[in-house]
Amino acid sequence: MTTLTTVPDCNLDGHTIPLSVIHHLSSEAIARIIGKQQPGNRLEDSNQYTWSFKEIPLEELRCSNEDGEEPSGGWKAAYLRHKKSDDLAIAQGSPEYAGREQWNKKWCENTAIYPLYVVVEEGQYRLLDGYHRLASAFWNELPTVYAFVGRSKS
């Protein structure tokens, strides 16, 4: 029997995390997973937040861009812009983009394999990491997604 785990990019001390235990992770463990993130032009240290693992209705993330808005034209338009950019990169010989659309489809089947990283500010979510994944969630009209949710310690 195969144990479902997070993807390698979402690891704790170099090890993927069994999905059966991900909801039991401590805030400190989640902070180690997230490390430092740079949404927009601000570098953020995950240690300034208290973290939890949560399932979030997708609609609550609609305006979670760093400016508190949706991307220009909405998340579905953002998905199409990324797809167009990926297709161009592939055509120009960049193989690392070749599997992203298939990977996003796999992620949409179980978003816990690589939770979004979001923080709560003034009662609203703000995305730290997962822009492409969130665009895919809107494109595929998922009802909910999994996220590591941070709340400021101060």
Image (cartoon, grey):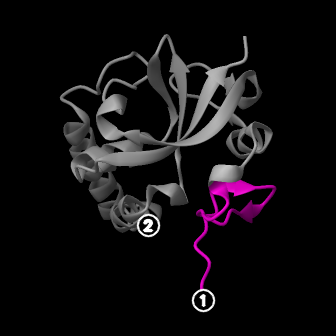
- At 33% from the left and 64% from the top, the residue drawn is 105
| Side (left or right) of 6 relative to 88 | right
Asked which quadrant contains residue 3, the reply is: bottom right
Numbered disc in front, either 1 or 2: 1
**Viewer-nearest residue: 2 or 91:** 2
Asked which quadrant contains residue 124, the reply is: top left
- At 29% from the left and 27% from the top, the residue drawn is 71
SS state under label 2: helix
Three-letter amino acid code at the position of disc 2: Pro
Q: Tell me the residue that label 1 is attached to.
A: 1
Q: Are marks 1 and 2 in contact (CB under 8 Å)?
A: no
- At 66% from the left and 66% from the top, the residue drawn is 18
Q: Which mark is residue 120?
A: none
Q: Tell me the residue that label 2 is attached to.
A: 95
Does the stretch in magenta take in 133? Answer: no
Q: Which residues are magenta?
A: 1-22
Report x, y in % for residue 145.
41, 47
Three-letter amino acid code at the position of disc 1: Met
- At 62% from the left and 23% from the top, the residue drawn is 151
